[in-house]
Amino acid sequence: MLKLRWRDHDWRHWALTDLLLAWALLGGEPRALWLAIALNLFETARCLWQTRDPWVFPAQVRWHYTLMLIAGLWPPLQWILWVQLLGTTAMVLFNYCPLARLLVLLYPFNRSEPFSAALVRRVIFTPPVKGSIRQTDTKNP
C-alpha cells in the first residue's frame, strides 16, 4: 500500500534523496549525486547531534546509507547506487526500508534473538511497520 507522509521530515529527506539519486542515475546529472551525498551528510550529522550516539538505529541507517553513496562514486561500485535507488524508492513509496532490515540481520546488537533462517524470513517478509523494523525482529515484540 502506498504510504506518502508529506508532513514527516525524515520521509521528505528520503524522498528528496530518491529524486536526486534518480536524477543522477536516470537523468545523467552527476551533480545530483553530489547533492544527495551532501544532503545525507547533513542529515547524518543532524541525527548524530540529536542522538549523541552513532549506534542508535536511525543514525546507523543514515551513516551506512551515506557511506554507500560515497562508495558508489568509485566506478566498480556504481551498481550500489542502483540498489540504493530501488531501496530508497521502496522506503519512500511503501515505508519498506531494505537497508534497515539488513542492519537488523547484520549486527547482533540490533536484534534480541540469535541469527536464524526464521529470523531472516521474518525480518525480510514482515510488512512495513510504524516505527522501526528493529522493534519487530523478535517473536515476542
Image (tube, grey):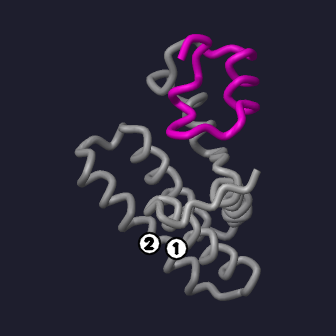
- 50 sits to left or right of 81: left
The residue positioned 30% from the left and 60% from the top of the image is: 46
The residue positioned 74% from the left and 59% from the top of the image is: 86
Location of residue 45 by image quarter: bottom left
The residue positioned 45% from the left and 65% from the top of the image is: 40
Residue type for callout 2: Leu
- 92 sits to left or right of 47: right
CA separation in Å, label 1 and label 2: 5 Å
Q: How many marks?
A: 2
* Span colored in magenta: 115-141
Residue position for label 2: 39
Give x and y (percent) for residue 99: 61, 45
- 136 sits to left or right of 66: right
Vertical side of 52 occupied by 126: above or below: above
Give x and y (percent) for residue 16: 55, 73
Which of these two is toward me, 68 or 15? Answer: 15
Which of these two is toward me, 61 or 90? Answer: 90
Location of residue 5 by image quarter: bottom right
Q: How dense is the environment of label 1, judged by Cα within 10 Å: few (below 14), some, or many (20 and up)?
A: many
The residue positioned 61% from the left and 85% from the top of the image is: 30
Give x and y (percent) for residue 115: 62, 16
Location of residue 20 by image quarter: bottom right
Q: Is residue 70 visible?
A: no
Give x and y (percent) for residue 84: 66, 59
Residue position for label 1: 36
- Secondary structure, mark 2, is helix
Does the stretch in magenta take in 93? no
Does the stretch in magenta take in 133? yes
Q: How dense is the environment of label 2, judged by Cα within 10 Å: few (below 14), some, or many (20 and up)?
A: some
